[in-house]
Amino acid sequence: MRSYHCPVELTLDVVGGRWRVLILARLKQGPLRYGQLKRLIPDISEKMLTQRLRELEADGLVRRDLATEPELRTDYRLSPEGETLAPVLQSLYDWGQARADRTGAVIGPQP
């Protein structure tokens, strides 16, 4: 087991990286299919999305559910552990929106 110097270091080790936080933030809204995630995060490559989803699943933050009815499909959702990040993700969203309002940064339409 790796040791850390402070809790923030551990947190960044688990959720750090641009794509991981964006994926978690989108899944906070509810279960999504791979294609839906790709459309919501258009700048991520398919290879990177697949890799990050696998990592988040291995870290216990994302669950992959296979549904067979009415069709075979895979949904991704936050695991119970991932759901504990919801307040943190909401705080990041709120801070980013307030920063955009203060600085005039443009945030694109949210589907």
Image: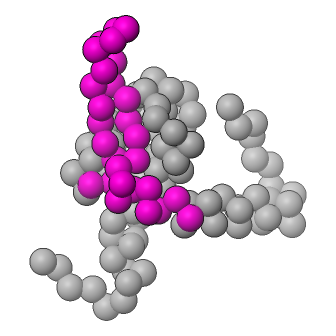
Q: Is residue 14 visible?
A: yes
Quick check: 89 above or below 25?
below
* Residue 45 picture quarter: top left
Can you say which quadrant of the picture contains the C terminus? top right
Give the percent coordinates (x, y) of residue 96. Answer: 70, 61
Q: Is residue 18 above or below residue 73?
A: below
Q: Is residue 48 above or below residue 83?
A: above
Q: Is residue 26 visible?
A: no
Q: Position of residue 14 (x, y in %)?
A: 33, 65
Judge left or right: residue 4 versus residue 97.
left
Question: Could you say where residue 90 lies in the image, as x and y percent from the top left?
Answer: 62, 60
Residue ID at (70%, 66%): 95
At 46% across and 35% down in the image, what residue appears? 31
- Seen from the viewer's position, the closer of residues 109 and 63 is 63
- Does the segment drawn in magenta span residue 29? no
Q: Where's residue 25, x and y in %?
A: 53, 50
Front-most of residues 96 and 88: 88
Direction from residue 107 to residue 88 in the image, left or right: left
Residue at image coords 51%, 39%: 30
Q: Is residue 18 above or below residue 51?
A: below
What is the magenta range?
A: 60-87
Instruction: Please tell me which residue lies in front, 27 or 8.
Output: 27
- Mark count: 0
Left or right: where does residue 90 sit relative to residue 59? right
To which quarter of the image does residue 11 belong? bottom left
Q: Residue at x 46, y 50 (%)?
A: 24
